[in-house]
Amino acid sequence: MGLRAKIGIAIAATAAVVAVLIGVLVHNRTVDAQFDLAAESIDGRLQSLVQDRAAGVDSGRAIVDPPDLPGPLKAAVRHGKRGVYLEPDGPNPHLWAATGLDGEIIALKRPYVREQETLRSLDRVLWMSGIAGTALGCVVGLLVAHRLGRRLTTSAGTAQRIAEGDLTARLPLGGKDEIAQLTSAVNTMADALAARLQAERDVTANIAHELRTPVAGLVAAAGLLPPSRPTELVQDRARHVRGLMEDVLEVARLDARTEEADTELRTLGELARRTVGAMGSGAGSGTGSGVGPAAGASGQDGDGAVRRAVEIRVLSDALVETDPRRVERILVNLISNALRHGAAPVTIEVERGVLRVRDSGPGFPEALLAHGPQRFRTGGGSDGHGLGLGLTIASGQARVLGARLTFANPEGGGAEATLDLSGALRREEEPESGRGAERAGRTEESFGRGDGKTGGDGTGRGRGRARGRDRTSSDRP
């Protein structure tokens, strides 16, 4: 139940309780006032009749020793008292007054119907007034709740935008109540957070830029060393440092939110096959990030390791209008992350506009599932290493594509990353849909049966493969 409903219900309930209390109070006071007035009137008449009867005048209005006299009143008269009693039994209540005279009981009796009708009319008015007051209170409560709820909803939406990375979003200021104080406090916190994050990003980007030239020189110098085992180790570490530096630079570019997608019309199955083929054929010359079982391999051995470890299942292919280089970049990082921190086999499942990368490892850490990927924070993984850049880059690239990247641990075990490109789907009536329909006929395939050369020209494929391979980062936070 939302805050608006709670406030409205609270005010309406308060109005209803107040109306009931006032109604009960007015009802009881009216009953007492009516009885006192009627009792005073009939008692005065009774005294006049007793005086007349004592003087020997009989008006005939008095009832002598009535057999139906109420018991409580009869007992009071026998004790020498004069009393008035309301007999409410039955549909027609009566008011009695009685006293004793020379051993006889002198009584008067009159209907009490008029007072009862007056009381019923008053009760109807009280009920109508109570309902009207409650309805008015409910309307007022809803208006107040709507105003407060709208301010809180706006504040919550802006806070969510800040949490998602829009550091320019601020809450609208206005008023002098507690919500205004909360708004001011949140804006102050957002300013401090934005300044701190921007400072951290600037430092990270500046360090990476400053290291670009010396790292490039280090890689070039390592390539001039004579062939030996130490040379291989130096070259491998140099490539690793260069890959890490490029990852940091890419994160800085994604944080700046200046990246734009260069869209083309492609089938997802083609992109998945091309990505895995590029990873396998480039295993021996990739960056220091590594790709799990293929890391450190060379030539055909590395190619075979990746092909054996990764399986592609095309349940239903589809044409999407997206940036193929960024999709491949996301897939490279997800597959590398699965191979490094999970366990083979790694399955890529293509179902229309959705790509799922699933491994057989221990699953994603709870912190990642709760808060998403965060740079330089890692939950460990199988080897306890990682900087959290791989999945951070994948999430940033998905944001540039307007896609949705989610992480989950399926019930059957392992980890599953889902890239949803449904928003980029093209209808089957598009001119190139025949090619997508043709590939959709292959419901399941192991990449070991493909050649990694499906779709596209040699130049485009080489460019996409080089960019994806050079920037691979396979850290599971």
Image (cartoon, rainbow, N blue to C red):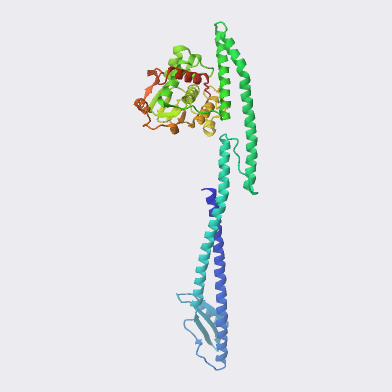
Residue at left offset 49%, top offset 74%: 117
In the depicted view, which residue is nearer to us: 24 or 243?
243
Q: Quadrant of the C terminus?
A: top right
In the depicted view, which residue is nearer to us: 329 or 406?
329
Instruction: Report whether residue 12 is seen.
Output: no
Q: Position of residue 12 (x, y in %)?
A: 54, 57
Q: Residue furthest top?
A: 226
User: In the picture shown, does residue 308 fall above or below 84?
Assistant: above
User: In the picture shown, does residue 348 fall above or below 288?
Assistant: below
Q: Position of residue 179 (x, y in %)?
A: 62, 47
> In the image, is 255 to the left or to the right of 410?
right
Q: Position of residue 22 (x, y in %)?
A: 57, 65
Residue at left offset 56%, top offset 42%: 156
- Answer with the quarter of the image where residue 460 lies: top left
User: In the picture shown, does residue 459 fall above or below 156?
Assistant: above
Q: Position of residue 293 (x, y in %)?
A: 47, 18
- Answer with the quarter of the image where residue 288 lies: top right
Residue at left offset 63%, top offset 34%: 193
Q: Residue furthest front?
A: 431
How many marks can you see? 0
- Answer with the quarter of the image where residue 410 lies: top left
Instruction: Report whether residue 245 is seen.
Output: yes
